Amino acid sequence: MSGFRTYEVYQRTRPGETTEWIKPRQLTSDAYLVDPYPLVAILREHTPCYRDWPGNAFWVTRYDDVTSVFVDDANFETRSRAQRCGRDGWGRDLGEELEVLRCLERAADQQGEAIARRVLSEMEGDLATEVFARLPFELLCTAMAVEPTTDLARTYLHLRRATSWEPAARRDGLDALDRLAAWAAPLLEQRRSGDGDDLLSIVARVGGSGADLAITVLEMDHDTLHGVLANLWCRLLTEPELMDEVRGDPLLVKAAVLETLRHRPPIVSADRFTRHEVERFGRLLPEGALVRLSAAAANHDPRVFTDPDVFDLHRRDLCQREPRGQYRADGLPSGISFGTGAPSRHPAVPEDRPRSRYAIVRDLASTTTRAILEDAPQLRPADGATPTLRSLRIGEPHTCWSLPVVRG
Amino acid sequence: MSACPFHQVLDETLRLSDPSPDAAGARRDFPLMPVGQACDMGRASDGTPLIDPRLFDSAEFQRNPYPYYRIMRDHHPVFHDTLHNCYWVTRYADVEAGYLDDEGFNTIPKGMSNGVLGNTQLELSGIEHRRRRNLYGRHLVGQALDRRIPIIERLAAEMIASWFDGTAPDGSIVVDERDPSRRSVELGKAFANEFPIRVVCQVLGFPDEARSQFFYWYSSMMNGLGGSETAHLGIGARQDLEDYVADLVAQRRVQPTFLYDDAGDPIGKDIISELCTTVVDGDLLSAEEITSNIALVVGGGGETTRGAILNMWYLLLQHRDQFDRVRADPTLWDAAFHETLRCASSIGGQPRHTTWDVTIHGVTIPAGSLVNMVDFSANHDDRVFADPERFDVFRPDLHTGKIIRSGVDRDGRRSHMAFGVGPHLCPGAWISQQESVLGSRVLAAALDARRVRVGIDVDRMPADIDGTSLAPIGLGAIRSLWLTLEDASR
Ligand code: HEM
């Protein structure tokens, strides 16, 4: 009878333990969607493992606590997107297949820059929606070696909301999963016998079905590339001195990307579930408990970063290379960006493996940023534009959804 | 791509430029619908109506929940709510099966209440639960209760007499200036708020001198349940209560106090004294555990019974023909009590946690998930109760006798789910029925004796959205019930 205990061990809350500074509903308020930082700071400083009753979750907010959960697969389980949208077992996630990883790496490394320049050249006036939001889609189409049609774009965008708690978005997402599977099935059939190195050929050759492809796409990270670029450029365009500094020294671009991932991570929180009862953070977390790891809070933890709320290109306390096996490298914290996966377990990138998603996204974001600096050197915000970040819905990326610009 | 650029597709799919409030944000203003009608939350491609989990936080759902529960029962009998990280189980048969299976659906950690109340038998399961369940249960039923009935009746009579001799609680009675024989009485303030708590305090043996303080602690605790906005006040009040109880426990350990019947003969130790000498697992209960038990008994018995009394009078007075028949035959008050709880109970349901993965109606619920068993919905399941939205004291499909743990399904009559069923069945079911029925009988008799006609004071009661009909009860109990009392001879 695993997990069945007859006695109560969950302590009642003592006076002073709950915060009087925050009300649970604030964590799902519009204020949180726009700016989660002050709210999660309250949790981090006063109640580092906050019991959110209405959301039925435990919020973990300190850097070391968040990373300790994130790397602890033995005690904390990640539920797949397929599971979350009720499509568990409907299709296989082939995203960890070596050939698939290589294919995605190839698309990003070999074609990413050209795609970025092309998309930028087609932009009419909004950097966020016309360029950054579009990049991951173009990249996927390139990887699949298919035309980026309007229909496919629609399917792709709907699909990304298949896990939404909002029923209409979820319905559209599930329908999109079905559409993508149906769209892919004949293509897979055609390419099964060929020797193409595109994603569809690879999926076909490992015996993948349309549903497998749809689930593989569902489980991929699409938000980080889009989000980090939008968040970085939102800042560059609204802080002219910063823009000048980066323009003056393109070597700072990588630092800007990493600092953006730390300072304004597009995925502000990630959920884990306890595999069994665990004693952590001064609490007993019951089996199956939802643990909400707040990157927004952790990346601004003053225990780890000095002046954490300051966006600083020259940070000496943020590691500048890919962390390995932990959230630190060279003794420095890396910042947390969910979506790019846990840090690679390999002490060095093995010859036969592609680079980590973290490295791929970091590099493509840097390349794209440099390409924009080169191709549109006079870029400035459109008159009257006041771009800001927000999550459209609870649980969705915190990023910039409108970045109107003029070329000079 | 050129025909319809990417950003337009983005705008269309994410509704970026849609200013309507339901397109974004965690709050949604649902339109207030005519009672019994659900607002449109969209449909799946196969036509199934959708449920937006923001509904559960809305004012519309508070006042008009039943059409939504019907959609859930008919189309999503296990609704996975990923916004609140829980599952809602809404059909009678599934709720009943869950309650009866306390291994598969354990009560740990109930938590919603123990944040304030402390750890109680509510959160225990299996053997630990059975050990503590009967510590004081006998005070709430059977002989021990029967012998105290006259005392309970007298308390009700005294409280109601105060309406007419000018000693009623402040603000509970307003006398019509033009016609002093007409008065408005708020049944809650004048009777139902205090009566159940005083009854329970008596059986507990809670000292009379701390009663007013106790009401404050009690209401703070009730308002602090479930991690609400005022949780910290509830937690503070709970601590104050515990500090008070600690001294009391020290006294009663050496000098127990007793309950007496009308003739002055001792019936047995009061509940607190009983708990002070109770040994569980070879150890005395601590002051903290005793306080949790006090909090549970009062918490479980106060608000709930208050709500039952108010809802019962509200419903009966809106169904005058049934009210007249009940007054003509006071044995019908029991049926009225149960039909009230079926139709509009004061507790919505109970949380359970799955002990292992379980699949119900095709939905797999992982181990350790929070499952909300919705009593409200079970009670309105037309698989069990015909025309469930109708209030009908005479309905042939509801069991109106004594409630038992295994549930009742006899002669086409089922027990309602308002007291739960199974190992955690409310031990206060019988005493609350006695309180509500005796209290109502005493009240009805007092009105008859004074030749007073009673009605709802519609001017003082909240109206529904149409501005004229009375507001529906919705989830929980009505907050107050203003009655008009008039000289019947005129
Ligand atoms: C109309 C009035 C009442 C209603 C609707 C009601 C409802 C309930 C329900 C639904 C439960 C089940 C909890 C579960 O399944 O987890 C319960 C449990 C309980 N109730 Fe009541 N109750 C009422 C009155 C009372 C009274 C008057 C008392 C005490 C004097 C009381 C004391 C308790 C206790 C101690 C429990 C916990 C039982 C256990 O977990 O084993 N209730 N009540």
Image (cartoon, rainbow, N blue to C red):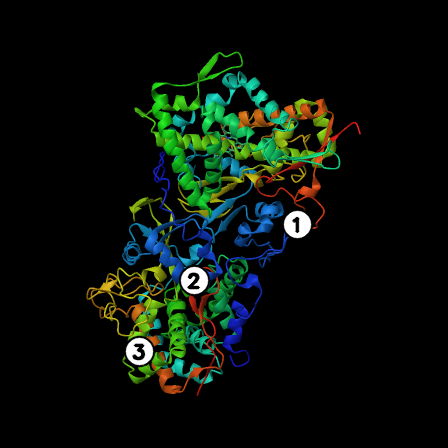
Q: Which of marks 3 and 2 is nearer the N terminus?
A: 2
- When asked about the image quadrant of residue A223, the answer is bottom left
Q: Do the residues labelled 1 and 2 touch (CB within 8 Å)?
A: no
| Circle 3 chain | A
Residue A262 in the figure: left or right of residue B174: left
Q: Which amino acid does label 1 sit on?
A: Gln
- Is B4 in front, or is B202? B202
| Circle 1 chain | B
Q: Mark 3 points at which residue?
A: A253
Q: Which amino acid does label 2 sit on?
A: Ile
Crowd rating for badge 2 (residues with CA inside 10 Å; few <14, some 14–19, many 20+): many
Q: Position of residue B375 (x, y in %)?
A: 55, 38
Q: Residue B248 carries which label?
A: none
Residue sticking out furthest to the right: B490
Give me the residue at 48% from left, 58% from top. A29
Crowd rating for badge 1 (residues with CA inside 10 Å; few <14, some 14–19, many 20+): few
Are the residues under marks 3 and 1 on the same chain? no
Residue sticking out furthest to the front: B177
Quadrant housing the C terminus of chain B: top right
> Under 8 Å from ligand 1: the CB of mark 2?
no
Q: What residue type is labelled 3?
A: Val
Label 3: state its secondary structure. helix
Q: Which mark is residue B37?
A: 1
| Circle 2 chain | A
Q: Which mark is residue A215?
A: 2
Q: Is residue B125 visible?
A: no
Measured Cα–Cα span from mark 3 to mark 1: 57 Å
- Is B52 in front, or is B239? B239
Q: Position of residue B421 (x, y in %)?
A: 51, 31
Give me the residue at 46% from left, 39% from top. B221
